Image (spheres, rainbow, N blue to C red):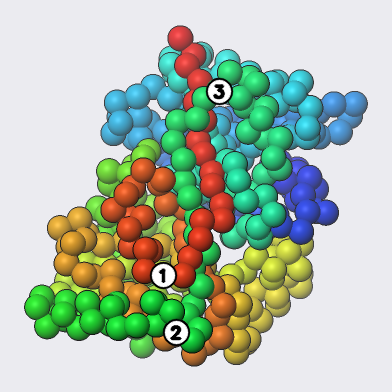
């Protein structure tokens, strides 16, 4: 398993844009004794070797809950990497196909992980852009191989680089702040930050926030709801990596959380410097970036979600009205959005008044097995 995880780093160690998987984190994710997703996922891992060396890897996953939710019989492939050799990529995907067929699956789709909080979507544009933690970077030949092997694009995502305003730009005007004030006055919504991580942990707020994400993302492609055990697992893993200053929620007058925003300074360069290992010394680069640096360049927007019944009531404006001055004051140049489905038109519209551009695209590919 260690060789499986580290192959990604070996393949991309000379690529300035790739951000490798964190070794310790990925080993935990792929451990059946740790990750609660293994309760409803069947999984197999494959390595490809040629002339005695590892030249590819892939995970085969059957997510029973997702298949039931979406009425499908799919085997997923994830954590896929390979050298530019069609024989290698073909062998890896044929291994997943055979494994899926044996279990009655009718379609192969990927790259996808266990849940939507795992890396998903193969990069199809933006190869000269720095990757973000927990998203997939791959060489341009990857999608070319899949198309040659009979796969078709099933859906796609876009990612934006959103610049914090300098001088006179529409984003510097009063629109977001005006809508935020109207939302506060009309509906009584308020944006709240937390006083400490202890408040978040003891109050069970991570689970509450992930519950909002469950409902906000429920109808998005391939999403399957996180259960209580998964929420607790993610809370334990990720809270220690987050700075409470970058976590905010929107609440109603009654104190119900209806919106969630989780951001963090980009760890891409720090993880590259750490060479994907926290120990023995890699942790220092992470800590320095998160907690010791006073000025940052890139803000990663990890999760933003609003309950469906409140999505047309200006809750998002509260997040932007808070984020824009915060980003300017902390020296951020731009924010990286999380991958957003390209056919989610309502979601795309929220960026229209910001100085931004689509700089990455990614896709999931599928192939019928029948």
Quarter location, residue 186: bottom left
Distance between the alpha carbons at the discs numbered 3 and 1: 36 Å
Q: Nearer the viewer, residue 145 or 232?
A: 145
Q: Which numbered circle lies on residue 354?
A: 1
Q: Which residue is mark 3?
A: 151
The spot of residue 73 in percent (x, y) is 39, 22
Quarter location, residue 294: bottom right
The spot of residue 254 in percent (x, y) is 10, 77
The single residue placed furthest to the top in the displayed view is 370
Q: Earlier in the sequence, mark 2 or mark 3?
A: 3
Q: Is residue 192 visible?
A: no
Q: Which numbered circle lies on residue 234?
A: none
Q: Which residue is mark 2?
A: 168
Residue drawn at x 32%, y 49% is: 345
Q: Nearer the viewer, mark 2 or mark 3?
A: 2
Q: Secondary structure at mark 1?
A: loop
Can you say which quadrant of the picture contains the N terminus?
top right
Badge 2: how crowded within 10 Å, few (<14), some, or many (20+)? few
């Amino acid at each position: 398993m260690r060789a499986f995880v580290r192959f990604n780093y070996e393949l991309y160690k000379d690529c300035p844009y790739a951000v490798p998987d964190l070794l310790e984190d990925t080993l935990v994710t792929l451990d059946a004794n740790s990750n609660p997703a293994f309760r409803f996922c069947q999984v197999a891992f494959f390595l490809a070797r040629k002339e005695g060396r590892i030249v590819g890897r892939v995970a085969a996953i059957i997510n029973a809950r997702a298949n039931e939710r979406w009425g499908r019989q799919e085997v997923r492939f994830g954590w896929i990497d390979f050298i530019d050799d069609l024989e290698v990529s073909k062998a890896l995907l044929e291994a997943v196909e055979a494994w899926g067929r044996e279990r009655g699956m009718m379609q192969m789709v990927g790259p996808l992980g266990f849940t939507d909080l795992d890396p998903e979507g193969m990069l199809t544009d933006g190869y000269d852009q720095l990757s973000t933690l927990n998203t997939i970077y791959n060489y341009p030949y990857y999608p070319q191989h899949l198309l040659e092997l009979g796969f078709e694009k099933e859906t796609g995502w876009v990612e934006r680089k959103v610049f914090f305003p300098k001088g006179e730009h529409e984003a510097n005007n009063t629109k977001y702040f005006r809508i935020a004030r109207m939302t506060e006055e009309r509906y009584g919504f308020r944006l709240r930050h937390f006083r400490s991580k202890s408040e978040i942990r003891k109050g069970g707020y991570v689970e509450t926030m992930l519950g909002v994400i469950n409902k906000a993302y429920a109808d998005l492609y391939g999403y399957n709801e996180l259960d209580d055990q998964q929420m607790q697992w993610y809370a334990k893993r990720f809270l220690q990596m987050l700075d409470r200053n970058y976590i905010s929620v929107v609440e109603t007058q009654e104190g119900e959380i209806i919106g969630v925003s989780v951001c963090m300074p980009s760890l891409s360069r720090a993880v590259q410097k750490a060479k994907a290992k926290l120990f023995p010394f890699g942790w220092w680069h992470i800590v320095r970036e998160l907690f010791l640096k006073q000025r940052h360049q890139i803000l990663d927007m990890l999760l933003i979600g609003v309950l469906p019944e409140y999505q047309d009531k200006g809750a998002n404006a509260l997040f932007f009205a808070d984020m824009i001055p915060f980003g300017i004051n902390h020296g951020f140049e731009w924010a990286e959005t999380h991958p957003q489905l390209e056919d989610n038109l309502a979601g795309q519209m929220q960026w229209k008044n910001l100085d931004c551009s689509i700089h990455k695209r990614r896709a999931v590919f599928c192939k019928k097995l029948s």
